[in-house]
Each structure stands twice: as structure tokens, then as C-alpha cells.
Amino acid sequence: MRTLRSAVSWFMPPVLESRVAVLRTVLYLFVIIDIHFLVRDPIPLSRHPELYQPLMLERLLHLPPPSVPLTITLYLILVVGCLVAAANVLPRLAGGVVAAAFTWWTAIGMSYGKVDHDHLALVVALWVLPTVGVIADRWRSTERSVQAGWALRCIQISVVFTYFLSALTKIRSGGWSVTSWPESSILLWAIVRRPHGLGQFLAPYPELLHIMQWCSFTAELTAVAVLWLRGRALLAAAVFWMSFHIFTVAILYIHFAPTAICWLAFAPLERLGPWLRRVKARRRQRTGRRSAGQSVSVFRDHAVDSTG
Amino acid sequence: MGERVRGISMPSLAWRIGATVLGIGLLLNGSLRMSDDAWPFGPMSQYAFSPSGDTTIVITRVEGLLADGRRVDLPLRVETAGISRAEIEARIPEITAHPALLRSVSDGWTSRHTAEPALLRVWLVQDQTRLIDGRIGPTRLVELASWELPS
């Protein structure tokens, strides 16, 4: 019973709701970026119904095949919904609409043969963030809740599972062998297929590529441990994974931006609101001091320009 | 600390526990047993396979013959052809059986390059690079399909 209770409290720690309020703003604004720069092809793809092959999700829900009016409607819903939800207004309604519309939008983008795996954490985030409900005072909230803790924990788990499950798939695809993927020519294969970045300089050194594969595979396999890290150790893990993503961009032009942004679920975002208020107050104080020093004449509420 | 903690009802707690168990279960099941079709619960299969040191690496491209006689590459990117390489690669068997499916590329390219001469014919080709002992070997060009655009 005690084990069950401690497992539940690990999955649902009471966390400041302001952290969720800030994360909502960031992630909903990121979705707008995403539909313009990452999963940006549903509208052009919907012009080719002959290439559409619905995913299981679309078949199970009997979703209609994408058409141009449908994808444009989804696009408009996403833009409006994200702007509303980013302001922490109508969080359940706007958040729920964005979650459904973005899941459908992304599913359409993946229904023409290519399925990406960088959106797991973001899709999960969009489904769990509305469940926290209304956060009074939004970024200024000083209330804690297990609802906020659960939502954040789900996003954190999705982030580390993106890596861990990737390692698991590598073991599975290699015939349940731990060494087949790290010892394969996968990085060279990727560099030949994407001959853009720094990868071309690494191509003549297959031994070095094998070492890099071992490092990334080990990191992915052990990524779940991040869930139990705190303080500087957690910061070090976040820095490591951000460097990993920058590295893959540099050598292959492959980014995992939707996963990377969800790392913010680990960050003490609740400090952002008070920090911004301090910066604003300091600036106001400085401006006040400067205007006092200049001894500007004031008539009613307006400063009177002495040079006028 | 002066912070309040919002309460939670038993049903709220229960559905969250259920959703967590279900979600983790679906993800593990997807990675251990399913295919990409199960997205978002499918396996993380991007770059997850293990090519050998003597594998052949293919880059699929589409080339087009313009009315002025030039044969040009039609880059398979959303912004240039309205469709990306991976989507065409996923449909190679269908395209070789029905080359008219290359219309998706020719239409997408033509609508984005209105100043260029008309496209007369398109080819689905592959640059096939062989690895030898884990190092880059020779590359050859292979034609998979061609389609003449209706005039």
C-alpha cells in the first residue's frame, strides 16, 4: 500500500501551477511555429489524395481523407486556438481543440509514407496541459496542485521515452541485439543521404562514427534516469541532450525541436514571472531616476519638453 | 511558504492513474510489437535500423525534361515540389507500377516554377552508392520509372 502511495505521489507531485501557465504559453506559441516550419506540408499534401495512406488512428476514428478545405480549416483553428490557449484563456476548451486539431494535422503530415518521431512529447503535452484547468493569476499563480504535477510528469516521461524507446526500437530492429545498431553503418548511411552539414567531414572516419553511435545509444538507453535527477545533475543532463540535438543538426540537419522544447517541463519556469516583474520594476526605477535627474517640467500629467 | 495546494477528487486521481498506465503501456507495446502505422504510439524507427558495411545507400530523385530540351533535377522538398523525398520513397512500388503518380511531383513543381518552360517528361531515378567495408564506394544512377506528361 505504501509503495502504491509513493508511486502515485511520484507521478503526481504538487507543483506550482505557474509553471504550467508559462509552459502553456511557450508550447502553444511553438505549435504556431511548428505548423509553419516543421509539419508544414499537410496543405500541399492534401492536394494528392492518390498518395494518402491513413494511419491506424485515422482509420479507427473514421477521419475523412484530407482535402484542401479541411487542412486550411485545421490550420486556421490551430492558429486561433493556440493564440487563445497561449494566453491561458479558456484553457480546457482552447487547449482541447488545439490538442485534437494538432494531433490530426500531424497525423495527416505522417500519412503519406514518412512518419517522424520527434512529436511524441509535444502531442502528449498538448493533451495533458488542458487537464490542469483554469489557473487563477496565470503566470503569477502561487497555488500548487497535483494536477499540474501530473501534467508535467507526463511531458517529462514522454521526453525521456522518446530517447529510451528509440534505443529499444534499435535493439528490436537489430534482431534483439544490443551491439548491432552501434556497430552498424547507420551514421554513414545518414550522412550519404543528407550530404549537407559537418557530417561530410566525418564520413572518411567510420571508426569515429561507431564511437559516436555507441555514445548516443548508451545515452538513449539510460535516458529514463533523468526522471530522478535533481538540481545540477538535471541541468547537466539537459545541457547534454541539448548539445546532442545541436550536434545532430550540425552533422545531419536533423533537429528534434518539438522534443527539445518539451525539456522545459523540467525547468523551474515558475521563476520566469517574478524575474520579469523584477526586471520591469528595475527598469521603471531607473527611468524614474533618470527623469528626476533631468528635472523635466510637468504640466498636469504630461512632461513639458524644455527644447520645445 | 504561504502557498495553497489545490485538492483533487478521487475520480480525478483515478482517471489520471488509468491514463498514465494506459499511455505507458501503449508506448511500450508500440515499440516492442507495432509498426509506424500505430503513430503516435508506434516504434521510434527513424534511423533505428542497422545497415551493414557493404549496404547500398539510395538517394531517390525526380528529374524532368523541359520544353527547351534541358533535363533538370526537380528537388523533392515541400517548398520546391510540394512533396518531400521520404513521401516519394515510401511510394516507389506504386509509382513504378503506375508512373502517372509522378504527377504529384510535376504538378507541385510546375505550380511553383511558373516562369520555367513546360515539363514534358519526368523520371524517377536513384543514386545508388555502395559501401565497401564500411567506407563509401562507387555511385551509379538507376532509372526506376518515367512518365510523359499529357499535352
Image (cartoon, rainbow, N blue to C red):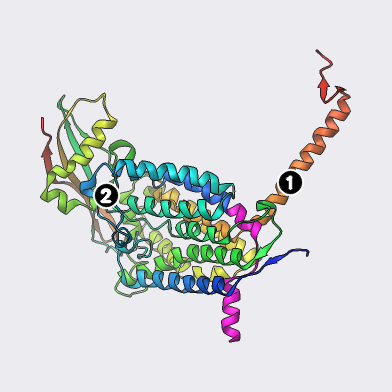
| Residue B51 x %, y % | 28, 62
- Marks 1 and 2, Cα distance to the nearest angstrom? 48 Å
Can you say whether B47 is above or below B23 in the image?
A: above
Which one is nearer the viewer's eye here, A44 or A234? A44
**Left or right of A222 in this view: B137:** left
Write down the residue under mark 2: B87
Asked if the stretch drawn in magenta spans residue A14, the answer is yes
Mark 2: secondary structure = helix
| Residue A217 x %, y % | 42, 66
Asked if the stretch drawn in magenta spans residue A21, the answer is yes
Q: Which residue is pictured at 16% across the width and 54% down the height?
A: B93
**Which amino acid, mark 2?**
Glu
| Residue A5 x %, y % | 60, 81
Residue span colored magenta? A1-23
Quadrant of the frame with the N terminus of chain A = bottom right
**Which amino acid, mark 1?**
Arg
**Left or right of A273 in this view: A126:** left
Q: Which residue is pictured at 60% across the width and 72% down the height?
A: B9
| Occupied quadrant, residue B37 | bottom left
Q: Are the residues tagged 1 and 2 within 8 Å (C-beta)? A: no
**Left or right of A155 in this view: B8:** right
Write down the residue under mark 1: A277
Which of discs 1 and 2 lies nearer the camera? The answer is 1
**Left or right of B63 in this view: A6:** right
Quadrant of the frame with the C terminus of chain A = top right
